[in-house]
Amino acid sequence: MDYKIDGKVVLYINVPDSSEVYRCNGRIYDRNEDGDFDITDNSNLVADMYIRKRDIHIEDKIFPYATMKNLREDLFEKARKWAILKNENHAWKNMSNEEIVRTSGLYREDVMTQKKGLTLAAILLFGTDETIMSCLSNFKTDAI
């Protein structure tokens, strides 16, 4: 997005967190509120970055405003049927959709931020097309 501020154009680009450490021209940069800092030659800061990023998994991202209404009932039924075909006494047989989501870890609470809600994994597995596109608007899937 671009904004005009005091007659100048400011570009806003959202760069989501990643579990990877990337290099630009052979240098490692760490981003914080004040900018991007070259940490290549500071082994302690590079190690800290690897430790910090080790726990980032995009599928665990919490979408606090997504609700069960954003998920498709028919996909829960399919998943339930497949689970029962593999094991006729599968726990999902008698669970509600909400129970499936919670017991599968597809609904989480982040104790660091106190965010709670459906995860991206829940949305990708059971979400409506509109919800998936809303959560991952920069991804498009084409079928041939």
Image (tube, rainbow, N blue to C red):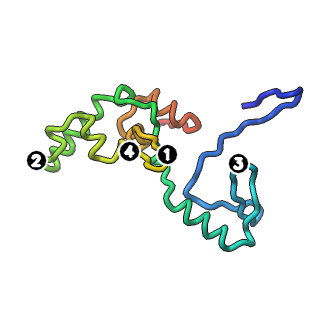
Label 4, on which residue? 108
Please identify, in this view, whether the residue under mark 2 or under mark 1 is nearer the observer. Answer: 1
Element at label 2: loop
Please identify, in this view, whether the residue under mark 3 or under mark 2 is nearer the observer. Answer: 3
Pick the residue in front: 125 or 119: 119
Label 3, on which residue? 33
Mark 3 Cα shell of 10 Å, populated few (<14), some (14-19), many (≥20): few
**Numbered tag placed on residue 89 in the rendering:** 2
Mark 2 Cα shell of 10 Å, populated few (<14), some (14-19), many (≥20): few
Q: In which quarter of the image is residue 107?
A: top left
Residue 123 screen position, x and y as percent: 41, 37
Amino acid type at image mark 2: Asn
In the displayed structure, 82 sits above or below 37; it is above
Q: Distance between the residues labelled 3 and 2?
A: 51 Å
Labels 2 and 4: the sequence-earlier one: 2
Mark 4 Cα shell of 10 Å, populated few (<14), some (14-19), many (≥20): many
Q: Which residue lies most toward the right here?
A: 7
Q: Distance between the residues labelled 2 and 4?
A: 26 Å
Marks 3 & 2, CB-CB < 8 Å contact: no
